[in-house]
Image (cartoon, rainbow, N blue to C red):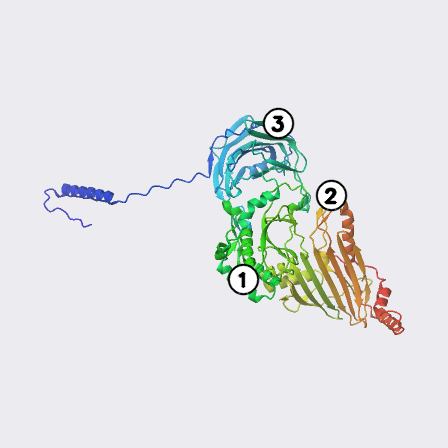
Amino acid sequence: MAWKANACSAEPGVSRLIQWALLALVWMVGTVSAAPVPAPMPAPEPEPFTIVAVPDWVKPLPAFDRELERSAESSQGYRARLQDFQYNGLQPGRSRWFTAVEFELTNRYGVENYSDIEISFDPSYEALRLHELWIMRGDSLIDKLPTARLDLLRTESGRHELIHDGTRTLAIVIDDVRRGDLVRYSYSVEGENPIFEGHREFQVHTQLWSPVDRNHARILSATERPLNRRVRGAEVAMQVSEENGVQELIIDQRGVPQYSVEDDVPSWHYNRGTVVFSDMPDWRSVVDWALPMYRLSDQPDPDIATIASVIRSSQDDLHGQIGAALRWVQEEIRYFGVELGRNSHWPSRPQETLARRFGDCKDKSLLLMALLRELGVEAQAALVNTNRGLESANYPYRLHAFDHVVVQVRLEDGVHFLDPTLRNQAGDLGQLREPDYGRALVLSPDTRSLSPMNSPQPRYRMSIRKSLTPGAEESELSVITRKQGGWAENVRHDLQTEGEHGLGKVFHAYYADYFDDIVPTGEPEFVEGPGDSVVISEHYRLPQLWMSDENVSHYRWVYADEIMGYLDMPETVTGRQQPYELVHPIVIDERWDVSMPTPLRLDDLEAVVDTEWFSFSKQSELDEEGRLLSVSFRYRTLVNEVAAADLEAYAAAVNEVYELSSFYMEDKPSLGAAVKDAANEFTQAGSLHPGLLLLGLLSVCTRRVVSR
């Protein structure tokens, strides 16, 4: 806009001001009249959390009840007074639950570590209502809600597992907290995940990880739609009443002791006291709910069909095609999950997963099912519990029993389970390691119960051949290792993260614990072997093979070190009350070939230990010339647990294997030559194999135990 002054003005100063004022008014009017009509403001989103009074449906227990008996002990400056949980399930799909907690801070450590409170929820379908935040200091009751700091954090509880689940955490920092204070806070959460379609399942723990003076629960449900109850652990008293179409159930415990579990207890033996409330009466109900999520479209996807065509042309038989399809999904679709709201359980369609090239277990499983269908293989999704909880006879959950999804394939040779989230697998179906989580719920129209997985392959299998050539000045060691199953997958993973050079340093450090001054003669070699195996070759020089003491100048104990490293033993045997879990199934074959340029004295070459938990054997063989000794060790697990009553016998058997997992060499040319001459005489007479004579005559040494 051009601006001009009026030249006819008699009073230039005043006139100029008037002109500027009129022009400004005209500009303002024009601007207002020309402005577009503003769009309506969007409705504000509901607050993720609010501070409100305790809802009317709750029957709160007395705050800071002085008549509540103090029974719980203080641990790390924290003593639990009250745990109150109340649930309102009267309206399907609109569940609400209330929690109140009281505790005492008994020392400075407790003040520093328990004065902050965190409450997690999912704002996509849940609303958090904060009700109370009090401190009782002596006879003074202090309201801390006006002064506490409240921060809503985006925590994403599954982020460490590459899961984006939308979790938020309300972090509450209480000011002016002192030793001896009693703290009380309460809140409620409204809403439930729409994926459950109004189905409900939640638990009340009757045994807690810390002792508490009072553990209280109150459950409301409609009389015409009651919740069934499944109890794990000891039975607990329940008060049930009905009035005006409402069923009220109350659990009220006083002086609840701490629940503890011993180390390495099998997960299927966990028996923490729990009452699960659910409207899922059986496994068939879970199938009816979940099966629609895993139905494939009748219209095949051309991109998936193209991938299947490439796989079909590259593999000769169906087992090879299934293995290739599994690896394609494992390697080409990175693991990452977006599990917001319904997506916590509803898988993405195969086309979507393929387009974005990432997905979680359910996304990858559905994509694998679609790819297998293009190869003419029918497959079903199978829900599993990776902690093998479904093996427990009294596992109480139904709807929330599972934490993982795999794929089941039925062929003429049997049933197979495939996990598309595993990495670094190799081999055809029947060769590659199949997951075994005990039992699975197969999402099939004819499913009525859980199916055993029963994988036939050992989870871990290893065969090692170690060739030792003793020399007068320097010795040589070559190690050829073939790893299969999980161990082969670990090697492939380590090659991606550490590289061949990094693994070479790890291997060198391992053998340096057994042989002083050992020197590698090159980098280890890694080759993909038959089936799912990886073959590793290592070569070393040993300047210091022989050991000596005041009695013997040249001797050596040689150990089945790989087997010894996997012998499983609990830290505490005596007085243990719970079973001990074993890594199972494991098969290790370890063989030492010793080339003897001069005859050696040998001992401890044969042994067998057979138990109900594992088997161990040690056998030897000597070539006809008496120059090549082969000692073969074999260790195989038979079960996945040891009962508490059997632990002392099991520990004794493990210690016996420790003692037998070695053999003895002594450089005694004179004695060795004499024995060899005697062996030749017996052989010429046709009386005895020289190797047997050597073993029989030379088992006379006193054992020298060398620390590992």
Q: Provide the secondary structure element on which disc 3 rests.
A: loop
Q: Is residue 77 visible?
A: no
Of labels 1 and 3, earlier in sequence is: 3
**Percent coordinates x, y for residue 128 in the rendering:** 49, 37
Q: Which residue appears at 55% of the width and 25% of the height?
A: 139
Dot label at residue 308? 1
Residue 677 left/right relative to 194: right
Of labels 2 and 1, earlier in sequence is: 1
Cα gap from disc 1 to disc 3, whole angstroms: 68 Å
Residue that label 3 marks: 68
**Percent coordinates x, y for residue 664 in the rendering:** 79, 62
For the residues labelled 1 and 3, say whether their Cβ atoms are less than 8 Å apart: no
In terms of image quadrants, where is residue 553? bottom right
Residue that label 2 marks: 576
**Percent coordinates x, y for residue 123 in the rendering:** 48, 41
Residue 501 left/right relative to 590: left
**Percent coordinates x, y for residue 69 in the rendering:** 63, 28
